[in-house]
Image (cartoon, grey):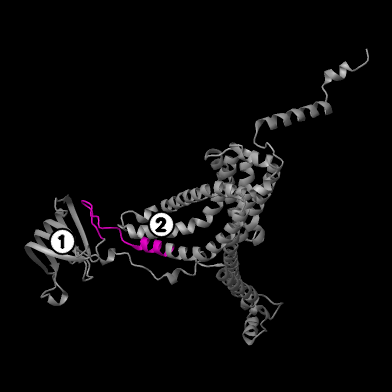
Amino acid sequence: MKKIDKLILKSFLGPFFLTFVVVVFILLTQTLIKYFDEFVGKDLGFAVFSELIFYFSLTTTPVALPLAMLLSTLICFGNLGEHYELTAIKSSGISLIRVLFPIFIFAILLTFIAFWFNNTIVPHSNLNAYSLLWDIRQKKPSLDIKEGVFYNGLTGFSIKANKKILGKDGKETLLDVMLYNHQDGNGNNQVILADSAKMYTTFNERYLVLELFSGNSYAVLEPDARKSQKDEFQRDAFKQSKWIISLASFDLTRTKKELFSSSKYMMNVGQLQHVADSVYNDYAVLRKNAPSSASQYYYNHFKPLSAKVDSIQGKWIDSLSSLKLEQYAVQDILTSATSQARNMKSFTQSHVQQIDYTLKESRTFTVEKYKKYTQSVACLIMFLIGAPLGAIIKKGGLGVPVLVSITFFIIFYVFSLLGEKWAREGIVAIPPGVWTANFVLLLCGLFFLRQARNDSRLFEADMYKVAFSRLLEKWKKVFPSKQRKIAKLPQ
C-alpha cells in the first residue's frame, strides 16, 4: 500500500466510525421515542433496556451504513480540499480517480458486509427485538395506587385508598382503605374496610404485604349456608389483618420467539423468496378456481325444465288466450333473481379481494427481499455521491457535509418509499420500483464524479455569474433592442 492510500484511508476511517456511531445513536433514539409509551411505568430494569437497545442498534445498522458512508466521505474530501491537500495531490500528477481508489475498495467491501449483515444478523435481531417489545407491551405497569381511585392491577383484588403517605422506613401508609376480594370469582361478595394499612414488598419483591388496621370484613354467605330466602351477610371486626399477595403477574413473561418468525422482518433472502413463491402459487390457484367457484350461481340458467316447472306453467296458461304470468309467479321470479344476483356480487367481491390480498402479500415479501440488496448497494452509491461532492465543495467539518447528507438521504428515503409502495400495489414492476432510488442517486453520483474530474466550480457563485453574463450576451445578439435597429438605419 502506498503512502497516498494510507493518507486517504487515515483521513476517512476516523470520520466514518464516528459518523456511524452518531447515526446509529440518532436512529436508535428515534426508535425508542416511537415506543416510549410502552416503557413508562413498567419498572423494566436495566437488563431489559440494555437488551432492547442492543437489538435495535443492530436493526438500525443497515440504514446507518449508507448515511455514514455519505457523511464521512464528504467530511474526508472536504477536509482534504479545504487544506489544499487534494490540490497538492493533483498537482503531482495523481488523478482524482486514483485518489478515490482506496475508499472505493473499502466501499465495495462494506457493500458485501452490509448485505451479509442484513441477511444474517438483522433477521435474528428483529426477532429478538420485536418479541421482547411484545412482551413489554403485555407487561402490567408497576404497582401505583392513586388516592381516591380504585386500583385493579392486583390479580383477584381491587383496592382504593383516600390518602397515601410514604413513611421513613420505605413503607407506604394508606388511610381510609377499601379492599374488594375477587379471588373466588363471585363478584363483589367480600369487601374489607380499614382505617389504615401499610403496604410493602417482601421476598425479593415477589410478594406484596398489606397490613390492615382497625377495620371490618363483610361477606355474603354462600347459597348452601342460607337459612331463609333473604340474603345473609357476615361481618368480622379486626384490629390487624395481614394479606400477602403474589406479584407474579407483574413479571415480564417471555413469549416463544418462534411465534414471530413468520414476519417478513425475521427472514433472510432465501426464506423471503420461498414464502413469496408459496403465496404466489396460492394466488394462481385462487385465480384458476374462480370460474368453477362462480359456476354454482349460474347453474339454474342451464337447468332443464322439470315437472315442477311444468306444473307452475300450468298455472300460468290461460285456456282462453295466450300465456299469462300470474302476479305471484312474477314476484317469485324477481325475488329469486335478485337474491341470486346479490349472492353472485358478494361472492365476486370477496373472491376478488382475496385474490388481490394474496397477490399483494406475495409482492410484499418480494419487495422485502430486494430491500436487502438495495440497502447494501446504497453504501457504494453514497460513496460515489459523497467523495466527488466533498472534492467540489472543499468544506470540511460538520456544517455543509451534514446539510448535504441530509438532503440526499431524504431524496433516497422518499424515492425508496415511493418505489416500494408502487411495487407492492402493482403500479410498476417490483425490480424497477425498488431500484428507483438507487438508480436516481447513481446518476447524481456519476454527474458529480464527472464534474469533480473536470475541477468544476459547481457550488461557487462566480461560476453562475459568468454563466448568466454569457447567456445575457447571447440573448442580446439573438434579440437586439429596437434602439440598436434604429441606429443602424441609413441617414
Q: State the residue lying farthest toward the top.
A: 491
> Which residue is the site of mark 2?
53
Residue 239: x %, y % from top left: 6, 61
Which region of the structure is painted magenta?
130-152
Say which quarter of the image contains residue 331. bottom right
Q: Which residue is mark 1?
A: 210
Indicate the position of residue 340 as horizontal and vertical percent values: 59, 73
82 vs 454, left or right, is left
Magenta stretch, main secondary structure class: loop
Residue at figure coordinates x 47%, y 69% from the top left: 261
Classify mark 2: helix, strand or loop. Answer: helix
Which label's residue is closer to the chain start, 1 or 2?
Answer: 2
**Amino acid marked by disc 1:** Leu
Q: Nearer the viewer, mark 1 or mark 2?
A: 2
Image position of 394 with respect to 386: above or below: above
The residue lying toward the viewer, choosing from 405 and 19, is 19
Q: CA distance from mark 1 to mark 2?
A: 36 Å
Is 148 part of what is drawn in magenta? Answer: yes
Across and down, in percent, residue 158 comes to 22, 61
Question: Image check: 154 left or right of 401?
Answer: left
Q: Residues within 10 Å of mark 1 (few under 14, many from 20)?
A: some
Q: Where the C terminus falls, by quadrant?
A: top right
Please give left or right for residue 242 compared with residue 307 in the image.
Answer: left
